[in-house]
Image: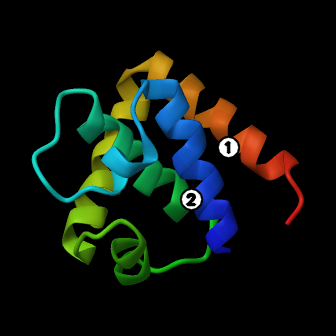
């Protein structure tokens, strides 16, 4: 399961041009890092069986922050076709992998 989390973080980091370290970092984030972090948390929630608190642990965040990120991306997917396509593309790449 945690290898899937690592893969999600790597895919999202590459798409947004940030590092996995930046996605994991709890300090101030730039305009590119916060959306990447939110998307990674959303994809982990949708593609694994991890709970909000457990996702928080792997992202150095609390469960309420993860819930906020998931809700924000869920809402964004409904109005932003680029975001919806990106989520679908990364999810497909993840689900095509074995392990």
Residue 39 vs 54, above or below: the answer is above
Q: Residues within 10 Å of mark 1 (few under 14, many from 20)?
A: some
Q: Residues within 10 Å of mark 2 (few under 14, many from 20)?
A: few
In the structure shown, which secondary structural element does the residue marked by tag 1 occupy?
helix
Camera-side residue of 31 and 84: 31
- Quarter of the image with the N terminus is bottom right
Give the residue at x 39% y 21%. 80
Q: Are marks 2 and 1 in contact (CB under 8 Å)?
A: yes
Relative to 49, 9 lies left or right: left
Residue 76 location, x and y as percent?
A: 34, 33
Relative to 43, 39 lies left or right: left
Camera-side residue of 3 and 92: 3
In the structure shown, which secondary structural element does the residue marked by tag 2 occupy?
helix
> How many marks can you see?
2
Residue 24 vs 10, above or below: the answer is below
Residue 64 location, x and y as percent?
A: 20, 71
Camera-side residue of 80 and 94: 94
- Colouring: rainbow
Q: CA distance from mark 2 to mark 1?
A: 9 Å
Mark number displayed over residue 19? none
Give the residue at x 27% y 28%. 32
Residue 56 location, x and y as percent?
A: 33, 73
Which residue is denoted by mark 1 in the rendering?
91
**Tag 1 or tag 2, which sits nearer the N-term?**
2
Residue 54 vs 67, above or below: the answer is below
Rendering quarter of residue 52? bottom left
Relative to 71, 17 lies left or right: right
- Quarter of the image with the C terminus is bottom right
Give the residue at x 75% y 40%. 92
Give the residue at x 85% y 51%. 97
Which residue is denoted by mark 2 in the rendering?
46
């Amino acid at each position: 399961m945690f290898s899937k989390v690592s893969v999600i973080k790597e895919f999202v980091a590459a798409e947004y041009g940030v590092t996995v370290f930046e996605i994991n970092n709890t300090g101030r984030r730039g305009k590119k890092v916060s959306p990447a972090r939110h998307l990674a948390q959303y994809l982990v929630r949708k593609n694994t069986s991890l709970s909000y608190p457990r996702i928080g642990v792997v992202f150095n965040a609390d469960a309420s922050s993860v819930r906020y990120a998931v809700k924000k991306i869920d809402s964004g997917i409904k109005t932003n076709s680029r975001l919806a396509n990106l989520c679908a593309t990364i999810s497909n790449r993840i689900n095509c992998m074995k392990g």
